[in-house]
Image (spheres, coloured by chain):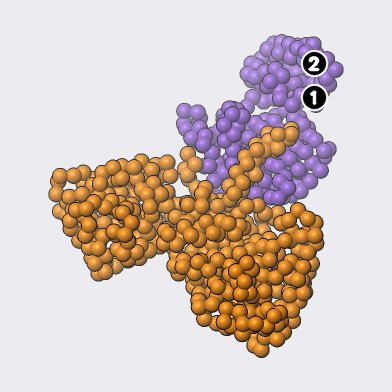
Chain colours: A orange, B purple
Amino acid sequence: MKEKLARLFSPGSVAVVGASNSFDKLGYHVMKSLVGNYRGRIFPVNPKGEKVWGLLSYPSLEAIPGDVDLAVVAVPAGMVGETLHACGRKGTSGVVLITAGFKEIEDPVGASLEAEIGGVAGQYGLPIIGPNTFGFVNLSCDVNASFTSEFSRIQKGGVALVSQSGGICHLCGFLAIEQRVAMSKFMSLGNRCNVDFPELLEYLVEEDDSTKVIALYIEGLDEPRRLLDVAKSLKGRKPIIALKAGKSEKGDSASRFHTGSLAGNQAIWRGALRQAGILEVATAEELLDTAKAIDSCPLPPGARVAVLSGQAGPGMIASDALEPHGLSLSRFSEETQRRINDLLPPIAIRTNPVDMGPAWYNPGNIIEILRAVLEDEGTDGVIFLAMYASANLKLAEGMVEYMKAVDPFRKPVIACFTAPPGIWDGPIDALDRKKGIAILPTPERAAQAMANLWKVSALMNAEGVGTWDR
Amino acid sequence: MGPLMLSVDAVTFLEEEGFPVLRSLLAASEDEAAVKAAEIGFPVTLKLSSPDVVHKTEAGGIRVSLRDAAEVRQAFTEMVSAFTSGNPGKRLDGVMVQEQGWGAEVIVGMLTDPQFGPVLMCGLGGVFVEVMKDVSFRLVPIERRDARDMLEELKGYEVLVNPRSGSTDIAAVEDFLLRVSTFLEDHPEVQEMDLNPVFVSSRGVRICDARIKTG
């Protein structure tokens, strides 16, 4: 399975079954995603035999002259069975089955069709992503096998998102573009015919070097232990974070047992995810922020944080956000304090949280303060906050210049650079996700992401959950 | 094992399985209660044993800290007459005479979830579990680290480690959770279980009351 998945995600050739020139067909949009982006061979399959998106099309899979590694299928549900037989006979490594109308529909015909395609897939050992999926995007090698071409705009990086919902992928994908979350793989599993969370976890952890962190969106599973057992067996290899939807907390009120009446599904999920070493997050925003921070920053050795802020207020709300997340403000050593005092005049607060306002016009001093604090053994990570003001226009650009000669940080730096659109865009892009820095939109989100870095580190090192919940 | 085991039966069964329990003996009469109490050693607790009463505290079916034979006799008479007049038609097996529990009260339970299968729960007893639903879950089987996490996750964890409430032997509670997990693996017929309360203290862990459903 892992070898076939590797070829499915990085195919040398792709056939699009149901490829179309008509905007109303999903096969049109799949072609749009591939053409001009994917570097391998594209074979549109269309019974009319006309050119599709300017490419020669084939009346059937059999008619294609070379190997087909991946078939993206977008034909009516009733034709899927025969199409899968053709894929099997052709020796295709895997299928993305975009077609909907299977077990997710009320009509029992859907469930019987789903059973049929499961049988055909089993006959040929054919991995199927879907049915009822928008597809997948492999950003590491420019394969957009989905019906949303804009996902190709997501930056290449180390975040793999595996979702039980196509809608959540669309939410997270566009937010990722806007907030510079860089991804390796990005997919919705649809009805999970035979490629489910456990298969993907094994592939992403063991086979996929481009993936550094795995983000899951889970709605509900018939056999959650399969996922949890695989995650547990892979514990400590790559960070796994999960957003679990369905927050019903109700236990079985009819139970004559205390335990039964207290056991809500969500509470069991919470315990089971932790047991498997998976960090649970509460929102889509937190899922993305956390994934981005893990992808961009080293994991912190502990929970003691320094807050360096250009203005006192944002530093205060970041500091306030530390404790509820289980973090604390670090205390600087005498040596660190002396270095800060050399770089900052005594017209602002120089202890943690540091008000760096007086150094605003000297980006070099700002970064030297950052370095001094990161070198302090009593500090495990830094939250760095810079709000634009007309007079500090050159700060961000100056930091970019100065950072060129600085070695990558060995502890996480989560930063906010807040400016009117268009003003600091270039420097923000140049600083973000480089040398151990991740940029997030607000001080509170920075604090939460820092806490999650520490929690992921604790889960991976089997250090226990300590006081997270109190 | 029957389909539903309550109080004395469940506690006795668990004792036979090697779990630490508070010593419990069933008494049918005032005289018998006094003799059994002396055998166990004072102070003792008396509990009504009726298959028809689920929540003994609410039904006035528990009397604690009885210091001598006279107190035991008086409590026995009062409990039985209150039960008979207040619950016409309900069955009474007798009164359970039990060694007095000591320390913090904990609930340890198990349920069989349709998706997850056997799930272990633990929480602090009394108001913590009833009002705050301060409980934690793990899938069976658990490892030592899970046992520790289950306790540390509780919002009321400080109650267990606070010396003012008599600090608890946390390692003994972890051992206990691990033993429950092993017991559940060895007994797949157990469908639901409440060990409630379990007394935990610096002296270790003792099961006070239990109910077990098998299937």
Per the rendering, the mark at residue A318 is none
What residue do we see at 29% from left, 59% from top? A424
- Element on which disc 1 rests: loop
Q: Do we see residue A275 in this rendering?
A: no
Residue at 59% x, 59% y is A166
Q: In the rendered image of this protein, does residue B64 appear above or below residue A378?
A: above
Q: What subunit carries mark 2? A: B
Q: Which residue position holds label 1?
A: B52
- Image location (x, y in percent) of residue B50: 79, 23
Kindly tell me whether residue A253 is visible in this rendering: yes
Q: Which residue lies at the image location 46% right of the left edge and 68% below the top edge?
A: A153
Image: A112 above or below B151: below
Residue sitting at the far right: B89
Please tell me which residue is depicted at 73% across the width and 11% down the height of the picture.
Answer: B78
User: Do marks 1 and 2 share a subunit?
Assistant: yes
Quadrant for the N terminus of chain A in the image: bottom right
Q: Secondary structure at mark 2?
A: loop
Q: Nearer the viewer, residue A66 or B18?
A: A66
Quadrant housing residue A400: bottom left
Identity, as a three-letter code, of the amino acid under mark 2? Asn
The x, y position of residue A227, in whole percent, is 63, 58
Which residue in the protein does label 2 denote? B87
Looking at the picture, does residue B78 appear above or below residue B95? above
Towards the viewer: A341 or A387? A387
- Disc tally is 2
Tell me the kind of residue under disc 1: Asp
Question: Decide: marks 1, 2 in contact (CB < 8 A)?
Answer: yes
Horizontal and vertical percent position of residue A120: 77, 72
Q: Earlier in the sequence, mark 1 or mark 2?
A: 1
Q: Is residue A241 left or right of residue B185?
A: left
